[in-house]
Image: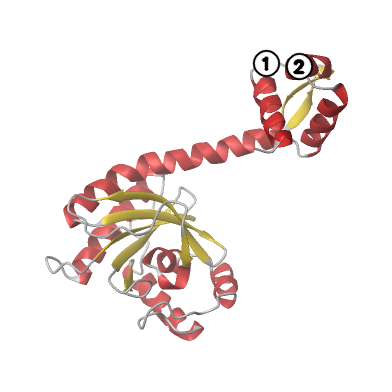
Amino acid sequence: MNRTIERTLQILNYVGESDGVTLKEITNYMMIPKSSVFDIVQSLLELKLLEQHRLNDRKYILGIAAYSLGSKYTKNRSLFQVAAPYLNTLADKLKRTSFMGTLDGTDIIYIYKYAGDGAKLATCSVGSKHPAYATALGKAYLAYLPDEERIATVDKINFIQKTNNTIKNKQDLIENLKLVKKRGYSIDCKENEDLMICYGAPIFDSTSSIVAAISFSDVRNNDYSDDEIGGFVRECALNISRDLGYLETQYWDK
């Protein structure tokens, strides 16, 4: 581990456990040269991860940027806690693997995974990325971005054939996204991997902004039609969104 990063984290933790500490107190705690502590503290001040105490400018407390990071973590934890019961229950019912992901540039990054009882395939791992245009997760996310953001994102996509079924160009993707928005769920029919059929839907927060997408993946299961599975996934996504404060009765075209 990088020593400076490790020391920086130790300083943040130390300051966070106090009502304010001086440079001398930090130096004594760290047992390193004062000059080294000073350099780290000055950098943290510039990044607003630390700030001077309003009643004593010789003491330091956590800054607004540290609070912002913590808030983002809490928000993600809330998303996981809300979504997991819905995803796990439906994954078991459909005998599929459930995923949750978010957009990273033109890729979708997987942030949650649960292999349902009886699921056969589950190749994607948490933290992995795949092109958004070739996945049910990605298409569900792209379809519900604000228009300008969606157009800008689609314009950046470099279309590469993952399988014979992969969407080949921008116009085909745009038409597919219109269909996704109309019915409220997406399908990846062997577009990213030759055996996989995936169904996805978007997750919204209390401001009606998309915050994630979910999908259910495995080999084709003839117990349900595409529209039946799509409906299950759409309803699952809507229930998660409602628990996050989403107020609309539905998000797909009425």
Q: In the shown orientation, is residue 57 left or right of residue 137?
A: right
Residue placed at 20% from the left, 69% from the top? 220
Q: Determine contact: label 1, label 2, CB under 8 Å.
A: yes
Q: Quadrant of residue 195?
A: bottom left
Q: Position of residue 17 (x, y in %)?
A: 64, 18
**Mark 2 nearby-residue class (10 Å; few <14, some 14–19, many ≥20):** some
In this figure, which residue is indicated by the disc labeled 1?
A: 18
The circle drawn on residue 235 is: none
Looking at the rendered structure, the number of numbered marks drawn on it comes to 2
Residue placed at 21% from the left, 56% from the top? 119
Q: Is residue 79 above or below residue 57?
A: below
Q: Which of 57/223 is in front?
A: 223
Q: Position of residue 67 (x, y in %)?
A: 63, 33
Circle 2 SS class:
strand
Q: In the shown orientation, is residue 131 left or right of residue 3?
A: left
Question: Mark 2: which amino acid?
Answer: Val
Question: Mark 1: which amino acid?
Answer: Ser
Q: In the shown orientation, is residue 87 left or right of residue 112?
A: left
Q: Quadrant of the C terminus?
A: bottom left
Q: Is residue 135 above or below residue 53?
A: below
Residue placed at 37% from the left, 67% from the top? 136
Q: Which of 209/39 is in front?
A: 39
Residue placed at 53% from the left, 39% from the top? 73
In this figure, which residue is indicated by the disc labeled 2?
A: 21
